[in-house]
Amino acid sequence: MDTLVAGEVTSADGTRIAFHRSGTGPPLVLVHGAFTGKDHPTLREVAVALSPWFSVYNYDRRGRGGSGDTPPHTAEREVEDLAALVALAASGGPASPSARGSSGGPVTLSGEPSGGPVTLSGEPSGGPVMLFGGSSGAALALAAAARDPAVGKLALWEPPYHVGAGAPSLPAGFAATLEGLVRQGRRGDAVELFMVAAAEVPAEAVTAMRAEPSWPGLEALAHTLAYEAAVMGPGNALPTELLTSIRSPTLVLNGADSPRWMRDAGRAVAAAVPGAAHRVLDGQTHAVAARSLAPELLEFFVAG
């Protein structure tokens, strides 16, 4: 089994972005959506499944997990974070503790999260970077791919753009409202607003969730929910101009059991990105299973 290597890369504004790397081969970077990070089981399992074929970089977006959070947040800063990691992956790094990030800042390495020693089964090969983004992370991956020639291929899971009459209607000033609730110390209310308005979780279900052991962990990430809204843009509108500018081969995936508006959004993204493919996975909801997602990514990324 490949050793999990923990490292950090420094973004353009000095923020340290934490990642795990596993496997050997062409680089693949995984970009998370709301409430998740490198230790979340879904993409962690995807990383394990794909590590026999790829050097997989699974990172914490700023403000969560092991990454820093330099204010003020903007979507542009998150694109820079991802660009720093893509540049590191494309260079074949980190191969040693002396490797450096794209901004010139240091890349630091440690052992497995438990602090054990690092014994690499092989070195990352570098080269064109495969990029996967899930949910709002898909929007971030799209923004990165539109400007970064190091991105070789792009795969997306259910980018939640709002197209068609069935899509949710977000409240005006959604990001500012979320930020204000957190600033007032109402982190739970921010989580509830995001879940009900953006994720379409019934209010009564959120009320029940507040009593569950996992709720404090969600509240701990409440400050990043405004970041998600910023990355998606006002009203989660489809960024047609950005999409038409992408030249990387692109695959858009949806779940057959996800809301229809999400499938509509996936089709709209695939129609706007030149040459993109669209697939629907049977039996999958927005909370896709790693065992269903990983084979699709493997097939797409290894194809010529």
Image: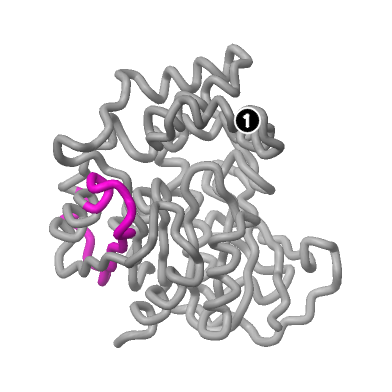
Q: Residue at x 60, y 22 (%)?
A: 187
Image spot of residue 15 (x, y percent): 60, 43
Label 1: how many residues lie within 10 Å, few (<14), some (14-19) or many (20+)? many
Q: Nearer the viewer, residue 293 or 84?
A: 293
Q: How many marks?
A: 1
Q: Nearer the viewer, residue 207 or 2?
A: 207
Q: Residue at x 46, y 41 (%)?
A: 77
Given the current orientation, which residue lies at the most extreme top position?
184
Residue 240 visible here: yes
Image spot of residue 81 (x, y percent): 50, 50
Residue 230 visible here: no
Image spot of residue 156 (x, y percent): 34, 60
Q: Is residue 37 left or right of residue 167?
A: right
Which quadrant would the C terminus be assigned to in this image?
Answer: bottom left
Membership of 256 in magenta stretch:
yes
Membership of 71 in magenta stretch:
no
Q: Residue at x 64, y 48 (%)?
A: 16
Which quadrant would the N terminus be assigned to in this image?
Answer: bottom right
What element does badge 1 sit on? helix
Q: Residue at x 72, y 61 (%)?
A: 108
- The image quarter in which residue 238 lies: top left
Q: Amino acid at mark 1?
A: Glu
- The image quarter in which residue 216 lies: top right
Image spot of residue 106 (x, y percent): 67, 58
Q: Which residues are magenta?
A: 242-263
Q: Which residue is mark 1?
A: 219
Q: Name the colouring of the figure.
A: one colour
Q: Is residue 102 left or right of residue 114?
A: left
Q: Is residue 292 above or below residue 184?
A: below
Q: Is residue 271 above or below residue 222?
A: below
